[in-house]
Amino acid sequence: MLTNSSSTLAVAMRDITSETALWLSTVLLKYCLNTLLAIIATVTNILNAIVFCRMGFASGLNQNFLLLSVMDFLYSVGQVSICGGIIVNALGLWKSPLSPSSFYKLGLSVSSLPQFASVITTTMIAVVRCYSVVLPLKVKIILSPRRQITAILLIFCVYFGFALNVFFCLELTWTYKEETNSSQLTLTTCSEFSRRQQLYDICRSLLLYTAFTTVAVCLLALLVALWHSSRFKTSVSNKRDIQVMRTVTIVSAIFVLCNLPAMVIPIIRQLWPAFKLRGYLTRSFQLWLMVIETNTLINTFANIFIFYFSSTLYRKAFQETFCKMA
């Protein structure tokens, strides 16, 4: 009886993702797809930044979209570096004195800064457009372009302060490896690292979930506003406002969809507590993290297609900039 119970428990605690499935997913997602997406995102965000610079900074929306493009560019560059390092190490061509694992951890830490700035900027874009629908006459006074950029910087500084507190607890030390008869730089942590990391995780989670919820609520409000506007005839100026509203709505929708897998992790852990890096569902968790990374990269390069096909002003500026150059 005890043997049957033990065998049943062992089957129940088995990871649903096999090692073969995880290996194939790593090759297809992390090595191939994510690397390609990171390169595409780097190029598309350069194009976005050039176009928005040409369009000018008189509009707070253009200013925020330019900032979003720059932050997405920095994040995608970091992902290109990380993916490139992973591929080089997998091929056995790693020659850097920095250990591959330390390079990967540093890359993730640094690239998280522009990624979070991108999240804040997207939230500000959604809030301003939602506010324009509710109080169109006061939005330019209350949420001026200068106040928008100030709010983004203040929120980012709070996040950066907690991140910097963790970075100061890291240091690089030389470690000798007998199997290779060489020394490598590896990351080590101070005694305060666990406490600082915990504070950082709380701050990051609080800000990220607040941003996600805010964008989701703004998305619902914008969808209702678009539905109402489609029922009445509109003037030329109103058509332009609707076009801007449609652009922001699509950007917000892509943001919500791409960040949803990351947001549901706590819910999954309530059902399966072992859904983490150290547990019997570790392979499934690693696969889920790769899917989150893929979704984040999709979110960084999808904006250029949204802007081009939903904004007449952007499309005109894009064609004037690059068609003339061609």
Image (cartoon, rainbow, N blue to C red):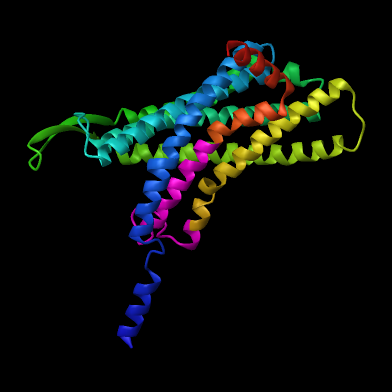
Q: Quadrant of residue 201?
A: top left
Q: Residue furthest front?
A: 326
Going 33% across and 88% down the picture, which residue do you hit?
1
Report the magenta stretch's main SS.
helix
**108 displayed left or right of 206:** left
Location of residue 5 with respect to 307 vertically, above or below: below
Residue 307, image x and y in percent? 66, 27
Nearest the viewer among 167 and 20 is 20
Residue 28, image x and y in percent? 41, 47
Residue 186, image x and y in percent? 21, 34
Going 40% across and 41% down the picture, which residue do you hit?
32
Location of residue 291 with respect to 281 vertically, above or below: above
Residue 127, image x and y in percent? 68, 30
Q: Quadrant of residue 141?
A: top right
Location of residue 186 with respect to 241 vertically, above or below: below
Task: Report if residue 287 lies within the magenta region.
Answer: yes
Going 50% across and 24% down the picture, which residue do you hit?
43
Nearest the viewer among 132 and 58 is 58
| Magenta-drawn segment | 269-298
Q: How many marks?
A: 0
Task: Report if residue 261 lies within the magenta region.
Answer: no
Q: Is residue 278 visible?
A: yes
Q: Residue furthest right?
A: 233
**97 displayed left or right of 23:** left
Q: Quadrant of residue 66?
A: top right
Q: Residue furthest bottom?
A: 1
Nearest the viewer among 100 and 10 is 100
Q: Is residue 286 visible?
A: no
Position of the C terminus by quadrant: top right
**126 displayed left or right of 67:** right
